Image: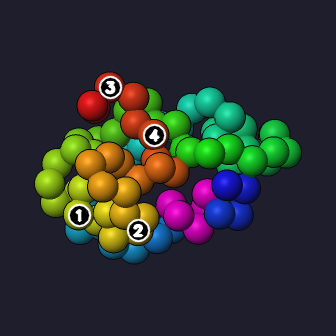
Amino acid sequence: MNRTEMIKNLHELDKRLWTTLDIEICGASSAIIKSALKRNSMDIDVVKTSYPLDDPKMRKVLDEILYIPNDLPSWLASIGIY
């Protein structure tokens, strides 16, 4: 996923949310989004969120964006929620 695709996915997530969601992005995806790194990444690494990503209501929104059975969407890799 390139920078444009990352931003598109994050905007799509934002459009579907019913609450404010603060996320801390780390790793290569953080540098790619800031245009500090010019390459692709398989996911967006999320360290911390203001709302649990494994909450059923949130999972439904995430699944609508990119459905992967029994897992979070492949583009959003959250640390410590499995």
What label does residue 77 carry, if any? 4
Dot 2 or dot 1: first in sequence order is 1
Kindly identify which residue carries mark 3: 80
Residue type at the position of mark 1: Lys
Image side of residue 2 versus residue 58, left or right: right
Percent x, y for residue 20? 30, 57
The kind of secondary structure the magenta stretch mainly shows is: helix
Mark 3, secondary structure of its residue: loop
Is residue 22 visible from the viewing direction of this image?
A: yes
Kindly identify which residue carries mark 1: 60
Dot 3 or dot 1: first in sequence order is 1
| Circles 1 and 4 in contact, beta carbons < 8 Å | no
The C terminus sits in image quarter: top left
Residue type at the position of mark 3: Gly
| Circles 4 and 3 in contact, beta carbons < 8 Å | no
Q: CA distance from mark 1 to mark 4?
A: 16 Å
Residue type at the position of mark 2: Ile
| Circles 2 and 3 in contact, beta carbons < 8 Å | no
